[in-house]
Image (spheres, coloured by chain):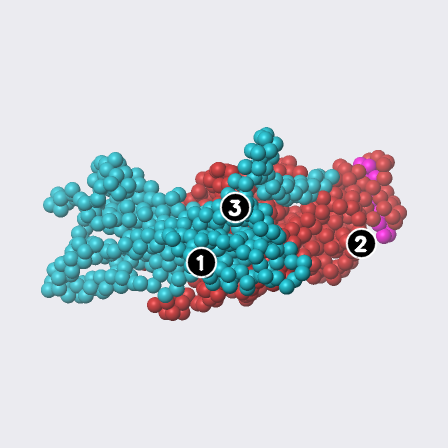
Chain colours: A red, B cyan
Amino acid sequence: MNSSYAVPAVALVVVATVLVGAFGLRISRTTSDFYVASRTVGPRLNAAAISGEYLSAASFLGIAGLVLVQGPDMLWYPVGYTAGYLVLLLFVAAPLRRSGAYTLPDFAEARLGSPGVRRLAGAFVVGVGWLYLLPQLQGAGLTLTVLTGAPDSLGGLIVALVVVATVAAGGMRSITFVQAFQYWLKLTALLVPALFLAVAWQGDGAPSHAFQEPATFREQRVVRVDDSLDLKLAAPLTVTVTGTVDGRAHDGRRLELPAGTHHIAEGTRLSFAKGTAVPTADPGTNGGMSTSLATGRQERPLYATYGLILATFLGTMGLPHVVVRFYTSPHGVAARRTTVAVLGLIGAFYLLPPLYGALGRLYTPELVLTGDADAAVLLLPDRMIGGVGGDLLGALVAGGAFAAFLSTASGLTMAVAGVLTQDVLPSRGVRHFRLGTVLAMAVPLAASVLVGGLPVADAVGLAFAVSASSFCPLLVLGIWWRRLTPPGAAAGMLTGGGSAFVAVAATMADVPGTGPAHALLAWPALWSVPLGFLTMVLVSLATPGRVPAGTEAILARFHLPEELRAEVKA
Amino acid sequence: MSGFLAGLCVAVLPLLAAGFWLGRRTARPDSLGDLGTPVEHATFQTLHTASLAAPPLRAGLTEETARKSARRLRTLLGTDALCLTDRERVLVWDGVGAHHRGEIMERLSGVLETGRGEAFRLRCETPDCPVRWAVVAPFTVDDRAHGALVACAPRESAVLVRAAGEVARWVSVQLELADLDQSRTRLIEAEIKALRAQISPHFIFNSLAVIASFVRTDPERARELLLEFADFTRYSFRRHGDFTTLADELHAIDHYLALVRARFGDRLSVTLQIAPEVLPVTLPFLCLQPLVENAVKHGLEGKAATAGGKCHISITAQDAGAEALVVIEDDGVGMDPVLLRRILAGEVSPSGGIGLSNVDDRLRQVYGDDYGLVIETAVGAGMKVTARLPKYQPGVHPAGRITQEFSGEYSGD
């Protein structure tokens, strides 16, 4: 892929983000008119900001990659990512805003008045934030590698540096405008190329067998294998090989590979003829987290799907960077309107990635083989349109992808750094936002260097599972159940969130094995969420004496609309 | 392999954190005992137990605090059963023989009346009841018994009587401190009521005079100003809640500035730079308006109207993570920092109004000492006042009362 357009595009996105962040406020808000200056953020602007912050690398690259590899089953991802806001709208948005809490630990303290639960919630915010940051950095690395052939970790390093620099320097002052700008940028970056791709697809005779098995090469295609892998062939395959297959070196020789498993060494070039079925790589060998999740899904597709649905539906409300944006709404009703607008904006966006996935299955099927499926969105414009036009569109997509990394990463970094600064560092005698920022980014950056290729959407799914098992019970019971007690909340978060966290760790550590236990670990939400709820309810019922004083007044404040409350008080 | 490493890190981190936490929890300085003689060790143990029992009692004698401290007190006395009562009922019974509750309360009335401790034999039908004797020691605060400590033992013991008396006296001291805390809270409440922002009488006179001057020449303008005046006074005289949102406070400042502009005309210019993200922030009611009033006063002071002396004030509110940063700046005469420090310390009363020091006091009371005003000034160099407002603080919400936070209980209207 030609990088002469893409690199400037990425640089432009970075510079534009920094500039809008630093000067957006100055340009738009310096005035002597109070009416203009004190206008609150409207639901639509705030919704665009929330969407901008929410649509991460997982949405921009990951979904297309998953659809490409695993087919239409993966549409549950965009559905889940969107429907999470429906649950948020119905159960949480307005009361959360009325609680006056800025972060999730604030909410825990406002509702339960317990510093212990506050600290625990803070720990989970940091955990979920780090889990969520990891795939952002890896996605950035992947994007830069595809665009320029730079080393894997460079992209993540760039994103980390830009985010830490801007956040620590206080450059994200007008964050609402930055994030809203990022949303529209991301939408444009997917929509415009998608239109051109659709036209190209029409011009190509509108092939429509995208999801017929197996995928086939539509033209002669040379595939370079970067990591050695095992090919599973159901039928004999004819291929031209330069490199090593099954331990024997070949040099541009035509080979007839019989059915069975073949080992392809790294650096080998395979040239497939037109019309050849795309072989699939044995997931057991290409390393990383993808394997265990994928095998879990293959073994128990129904269980995995429900696990995914539960995690994404209930996990959204516990995402630290989403929660803080609701504070910007002036009151509970505005928070609800904002959530409805978010549903619209995100729903519109999520129509696009599956399109890229389907086209990718037609035009870049070799990605299934090399395990870089997340790169489909980036490669398609070049592959289908080509020439300068393809390069320009590719640059636009690349810019959009970087916007996705930057916006989500900066939102998460601010949320994590805020918790570190407020709740962790002061006990160590430091109260320094900059130190918190560096710490918030350093851990996932180190982890992203350690971990190899992992499908970003899957990794984000794990963060959702932890969030759904810890914060969803806290928020839902905290808002709707008056008998919740601090020990109950702490126990529920520890059991639910903790077990989900252990499962995630086991999955990431690639604990060997298959079978039901393995699937249980790879998709923890289906058991860890009920476990969290149940523990919270049972322990709360067992400690009735610890219901915080003033719970009635607090819940009334959560649920009464603000205007009504003012009348009652006055 | 690298996936394994990363997973290992993920798994090890929480374990490390848990271990650290456990270590912190369990690493009581008990081990110091190894360094001293057994006597020193015992002394240390006793003092340590006593110090652990103290904090709950500092909150007064309630069921909850009694429950928290009873076990520690029983360790201190080394008895089989220990009971804490207030004047009417048993608050907690720690240890064996809880069926004596009723009997104890019967015998207690006399003790609470005289304020003198006593020991008596318990009547008991249970043949193998482990407690036969009870020692009662009242808690006296200001010569009045507030409750009693009852220690039960299998047999009469003079040592126990003395020990119970000492422990009860120690608890009494804690309760006295609790009383002290309460009166301090009441003092703070009274202080807050006194501090409650008031608009200065000068402002009212000046505004009415300005409006009067427009009544004949420009009745429409006069009417508008009168409405501004009404809005501003309604805001500042309102009585529900001690907190307001930044948006409402800025509206009040707008009304205020409209009246001031009517008086000074072109001499006063104001720019605003408000980040919309911080408009919902809750803050103590009328705590920015005095700062603006101060800026107007300092800005125009010493600039003769005839010389066309102009003043520029800028008000900015920025979003800074979990805080909002409000900066109010004027280009006026400034102030000697030494004098300012003395004004803020309450050593010198300022020339007019209570402005800065009042706001500073209230911010510190609501948010803690870290959140006082930061003022940068020098003679002739203008003044820049910075207030940091946390986006969330327990007990701070638009309908809340400042007192709520200090008394720890809900005090509705």
Q: Residue at x 38, y 69 (%)?
A: A568
Camera-near label (1 vs 2) is: 1
Q: Residue at x 85, y 52 (%)?
A: A234
Q: Position of residue A265 (x, y in %)?
A: 79, 38
Camera-near label (2 vs 3) is: 3
Q: Position of residue B5 (x, y in %)?
A: 70, 39
Residue A238 sits inside the magenta stretch: yes
Q: CA distance from mark 3 to mark 1?
A: 19 Å
Picture quadrant where residue A78 is located: bottom right
Magenta stretch: dominant SS? strand
Q: Are marks 2 and 3 on the same chain?
A: no
At label 2, the amino acid type is: Gly
Give the extent of the magenta segment: A233-245
Q: CA distance from mark 2 to mark 3?
A: 65 Å
Tell which circle, 3 or 1, labels the residue nearer the N-terminal end. 1
Q: CA distance from mark 1 to mark 2?
A: 70 Å
Q: Residues within 10 Å of mark 3 (few under 14, many from 20)?
A: some
Side of B210 relative to A193 (left or right): left
Q: Are marks 1 and 2 on the same chain?
A: no
Q: Position of residue A290 (x, y in %)?
A: 72, 48
The residue marked by circle 3 belongs to what chain?
Answer: B
Name the secondary structure under disc 1: helix
Judging by the rendered image, the residue that carries numbered circle 2 is A515
Q: Which mark is residue B112?
A: 1
